[in-house]
Image: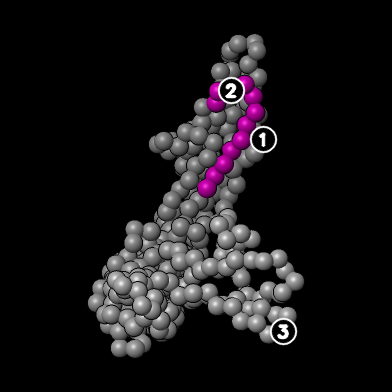
Amino acid sequence: MVTLLRVAGASDCAPLAITSQPQSQVVLENCSGNFFVSVRGTGPYSYQWFRDDHPVPAATNGSYTMTPVSLADNGARIYAIISNDCSKAISLEVQLYVSLDVVPPRVLRSRGDSSLERVIVTFGVGGCVGGPGLDPSSAQEPFNYSLTGGIIVSNALLEPNGTNLILTTSRQVPDTLYTLTIQNVRDRSGNCIPPASQTTFPSWVMVAGSNPPKIVPPSVIQTRSGSDIWITWPNGSFLQVATDLRGPRHTLLNADYPYAVTVEEPAQFYRALFDP
């Protein structure tokens, strides 16, 4: 039900009319529920959101975000009251439905760095952006990670965003491809990464003859067959392209691997972006 109440006020005050109502929604646990309302009429407006008929502290603008939601929030009744100098409007009452998060964490990419003693691993966690993050106790257990080539993982540090992990390793051999195997890592909802999840990355490259030794990211490689040109780039990085050597550069987030170009295309400059 939408309610509009007229309040005594100045004759030039236009009463409020709700132009966009909040909507009921289904949200995964540990994600965010977002509610919006829009009005027209003479401003300024005063907003107050209510949950189960109780005013929500600090929820006093056109939107209200519940984050993170839990199973205890399932069925919460949400509405807003908006007022100006001459009227008051009550929005539709909507509901929040919370669904159990059963999406296991997954490894997205990995990369080394110039120290040759670190691996940065990025995970996808939960079914929403900004989801619950990894469980620190399992993510920071070094025995949950193993590397090929006899490389030992001695420490694991989960960054505050809950999805980036920094592994400390024994010394990696420059310009070498490694495979990282991950097991027993859970997210905050208790979901475990699929057994023996793997990601590969190339260690960084030592510049020949540099003094002192200079270590740089692996390079982008171009190969050609007839009129076809193929671009490959290091695992764990994004391919960037520019029409000028000085940029600006555009990140090809979903580029096919390898990336195909032709000799008829204008000159392009490619590089690998390591982020994070």
Question: Crowdedness of circle 1 by 10 Å Cα count: few (<14), some, many (20+)?
Answer: few
Question: Crowdedness of circle 2 by 10 Å Cα count: few (<14), some, many (20+)?
Answer: some
Residue at disc 2, secondary structure: loop
The reply to whether the magenta stretch includes residue 157 is no
Residue at disc 3, secondary structure: loop
**Furthest-right residue in view?**
264
Q: How is the image coloured?
A: one colour
Residue at 65%, 28% (x, y): give it. Answer: 40
Q: Which residue is mark 3?
A: 226
Q: Earlier in the sequence, mark 1 or mark 2?
A: 1
Residue at 40%, 64% (x, y): give it. Answer: 163
Q: Which residue is mark 1?
A: 19
In terms of image quadrants, where is residue 10? top right
Bounds of the magenta span? 34-45
For the residues labelled 1 and 2, the Cα–Cα distance comes to 14 Å
Q: Is residue 1 visible?
A: no
Q: Which residue is mark 2?
A: 43
In the picture provided, is 163 more to the left or to the right than 83? left
Q: Earlier in the sequence, mark 3 or mark 2?
A: 2
For the residues labelled 3 and 1, the Cα–Cα distance comes to 60 Å
Q: Earlier in the sequence, mark 3 or mark 1?
A: 1
User: With respect to residue 131, does 236 lie above or below?
Assistant: below
